[in-house]
Amino acid sequence: MTTMRLLAITALLAVASGAAAADLRVVQRSKKFLVDRLDIHVGDTVRFVNDDEVSHNLYSATPGMQFEVRIQQPGQSDKVTFKTAGVAVVQCAIHPQMMLRVGVAP
Amino acid sequence: MSRSRRPGGQRVGGILLAAVLVGGTNGVAGGGAAGIDELKHAFRRPVTIPFPADNAYTRDRERLGAMLFFDPRVSGSGSMSCATCHNPGLAWGDGLPQAVGHAMQKLSRRTPTILNQAWADSLFWDGRAGSLEAQALGPISAPQEMNQDPTRLVDTLRKLEGYRTLFEIAYPGEGLTTATIAKAIATFERTVVSGIAPFATWVAGDEAAISEPAKRGFLLFNTKARCAVCHRGWNFTDGSFHDVGHETSDLGRGVLLPRLVLMKHAFKTPTLRNVDRRAPYMHNGTLATLRDVVELYDRGGVDRPSRSREIRPLGLTSEDKDALLAFLRTLTSTDTPVTVPELPR
C-alpha cells in the first residue's frame, strides 16, 4: 500500500515539475493498477496503459464523472481528461477487483 | 472436511487453515521441473481464511451463522433454508441445471457453490454484491427465491429466545437485525472451505498423488488450453467476468453495465475446486459434463462482439482433453460430512 502511495506521489511530482500539459500514466499489470489513488486537478489528462497479458475494460460510473475506455488489448493505452472535480472510482469491468480512485481538485 | 480450518487458530485478518501446503518456488514458468514448480506455486493453498475488519471471525458468529444457514424459518414459507439450494451433500450447490425457488419456481440460473467464497471480491453470477454480507439477504428477500420480508424475518427470530441469546453473544450490543443476520451468515459461509485434494498433495511434493496424464493436464491448463488466464490462484478463479461464447439470452453482468459491450452475456469465473462434483455446468446448467465444457472452450464458443478477447479456438487433441479432465478431477477433496446444527425452538 505504501509503495502504491509513493508511486502516486512520484507521478504527481513529475506533473508538478513538468510541462503545463499534465500527462499522468497509470499502468495496469498483473490484473492490478500499480497505484490505488491518484490526485490531480481539473483539466489534467491521465493515460491508462495496459501493460498486462490480458485485456482490460476501464470505466467510471461515478455520478458526474462517468467515462468508458475501449477494450484495451495488451500494450494499448488511452487518455482520459478529467473535467469535473470530485473523486472518480475507476474500475475494470472484467476484473472488478481492479479499483483506482482519482481525486480531481478544482 | 469442507470446513478445514484449525479451531482456535485465529490470526489477525483471518483464521488458520488446517494445512499449509507450500510448493517449490524456483525456476521459470513454461517448461521443465523448475517451471512446473513455479506454476504449482501460483495455486498454493493459503494459510488463513480472510475475514473483514468489521465482521471479524469468532466461533460464536460461525455457530450462529450455521444455524441461520440451515434454518428454514429464514424463508417466507418457513420451508426453505439457504442449504436447500446450497446443499453440503452436493458440494454446496443443488445439482440442478437451474435453481428452484419459492413455490417451486424455476429460476434462470444455476445455484453457485458457496465453497471458498471467503476469497470472492464480488458475489452472484453477475457480481452485483460486493461482499458476502451484502449478498446474504439477497436470495432470502427475493420473491422468486426465499420470499422473505426482512422485517418479518427479524420479528420471527426475535420471538425465539435461543436466537436472542445467540445474537447477543455473537454481536454484543448490535442487536438482532438484518445487518447482524447477514454478518452471521457471511461468517459461516467464509468457513466453508474445500479440503485437501490430490492436487494439493502433489503441490506439496508427493509426486504419486496424481497421475501422469493429470500432470500433463495441469501443464495444458496453464498453456495451450489457456484455462489459467482466468482460473488462476488457489481457488482457481481470478474473480473476472467474461462472455465465454456460451449460447444464452441472459445478459448477465451486462444488465449492471449496459454500455460496456464486453459485459453482455458475461458471468463470473467460478472456482474449479471440487468441480467434478458440481455438474451440470455454466451459469444456466446447460452443459451436462465437464467434457462438454472442455469442448465448448476448444471450439471457442459463439463469435460475437461481447465474447471475451481471451476466448479463441484452442485446437486441443483428444489426448489433450482427456489430460485436462484427469487434471480437473484431482481438484476434488475428500470431505467429512457436515453436521447440521440443532436449531432454537
Image (spheres, grey):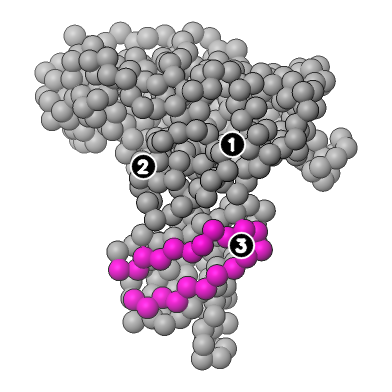
**In front of the other: B110 or B57:** B110
Q: Position of residue B212 (x, y in %)?
A: 82, 20
Residue B161 appears anywhere in the view = no
**Is residue A72 at least partly visible in the picture?**
yes
Q: Disc number at residue B315?
A: none
Density class for disc 1 (Cα within 10 Å; few <14, some 14-19, many ≥20) is some
Q: Would residue B13 be found to the left or right of residue A34 on screen?
A: left
Residue found 43% across the figure and 54% down from its top: B260
Q: Which span of residues is magenta-colored?
A: A64-84
Q: Which residue is mark 2?
A: B128
In 3D space, how far apart are the residues under numbered discs 2 and 1 (Cα atoms)? 25 Å
Mark 3 Cα within 10 Å, few/some/many (few <14, many 20+)?
A: many
The location of residue B327, given as percent across then percent down, is 71, 23
Q: Which residue is mark 3?
A: A50
Badge 2 sits on which subunit? B
In the rendered structure, which amino acid carries the disc numbered 2? Answer: Arg
Residue A19 lies in the magenta-colored region: no
Q: Which residue is labeled 1 in the image? A: B301
